[in-house]
Image (cartoon, rainbow, N blue to C red):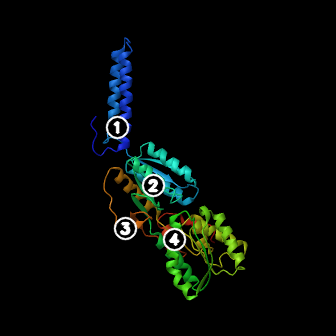
Amino acid sequence: MYVKPKLKLHKMLRAASIIAALMLTSSCMLDSGSGNGTAKIGETLKQEEQAKEQRSPGDDQLVIGLSIDTLKEERWVKDRDLFKDAVERLGAKIDVQAANGDDAKQIAQAENMISNGVDVLVVVPHNAEACAAIVAKAHQAGIKVISYDRLILNSDVDLYISFDNEKVGELQAQAIVKQVPKGNYVLIEGADTDNNAHMFKQGQMNIIKQLVDKGDIKIVYDQFTKEWIPANAMANMEVALKANQGHVDAVIAANDGTAGGVIGALTDHQLAGKIPVSGMDAELAAAQRVVEGMQTMTVYKPIPKLAEAAAELAVKMARGEEVSTDKKVFNKKIDVPAILLEPIAVDKSNIDATIIADGFHKKTDIYRNVK
């Protein structure tokens, strides 16, 4: 059997198994002694020709696998839908599987996609360390892996595409410092297992450390939020308020979900709208809180640009084309080729010109509760 050089190992094995099965079927038919053996042989040859057509690399439709941490958050549903649409517009198929925060499930789902012979695997990791096993298994099968939005650590992942996550943290801190240049600060970070959460915090500290060193800002509470769950963020904020007898002047929250939890706790203490709170992701509920004066800002990451760029890169890599980048991000093992898009700080003053102008949310939905 002649195989074109660019035919991947997993597709070669798949084609070989088809041929072996057809040869066995043909042999059985020849030995059967049936009167219509000639017809059966003709039918088998026809099946072999169809199999050749199916396994031809030029005719195979590319399949992109998307292993996603969760679809329980508005943000990730948008990513899934936008990425799927972009992949299909490029003529490829897509296999999407969501683990909803379960590390073992995400690894098992990825293994399933690998065994099914996806051409490229795109991963939004739940646990940045645990998903290194996915990269190793994919590479064993000759499949490249793109780390989407969140970086997979301690792995030989082929490409990382995201936003500049340190910049996200800087934008959050800059907005809050502008409101409160001095005072007691609470930091409600994301999940400790998510490398992005650490990058957001690094960006925040890039802005506030010098003010902390000067004594202008005092960090009175600093805690990661397990699984990014708003209820956990709310519980953390309750602890912060109790530990400081309610003397909190500002909160840097890592995303809109944690911001929602923080604002829930502040509401219970009649402090909502009085204490600046940051966020990220431009979720609808957060955008509503921004125009209502309950949340100071959110960081808008234009997800359509991210999803479309990731889809184009995935299809290119599936075709065996080279992908070049001008940045690299260290993942504790290698410098991963990276594409980092620019995030945008959004508050009352520019929400119409950004989130609404892009069609990310409708103006009527955002201003629903504003009279």
Query: Which residue is under mark 1?
Result: 55
Give the mark nearer the N terminus: 4 vs 1: 1
Q: Which residue is mark 2?
A: 83
Instruction: Please name the residue shown 51% across and 71% down the image.
Output: 200
Amino acid type, callout 1: Arg
Query: What amino acid type should be assigned to the residue bearing mark 3?
Result: Lys
Q: Earlier in the sequence, mark 3 or mark 4?
A: 4
- Mark nearer the N terminus (2 vs 1): 1
Look at the numbered disc 4 and give the secondary structure of its residue.
helix
Q: Residues within 10 Å of mark 3 (few under 14, many from 20)?
A: few
Q: Quadrant of residue 103?
A: bottom right
Q: Nearer the viewer, residue 233 or 331?
A: 331
Q: Give the image quarter of residue 86.
A: bottom left
Q: CA distance from mark 1 to mark 3?
A: 37 Å
* Residue 204 x, y percent position in the rendering: 52, 76
Query: Looking at the rendered structure, which numbered label has been put on residue 327?
Result: 3
- Relative to 40, say whether 162 is above or below: below
Q: Which mark is residue 200?
A: 4
Query: What residue type is disc 2 on?
Result: Phe
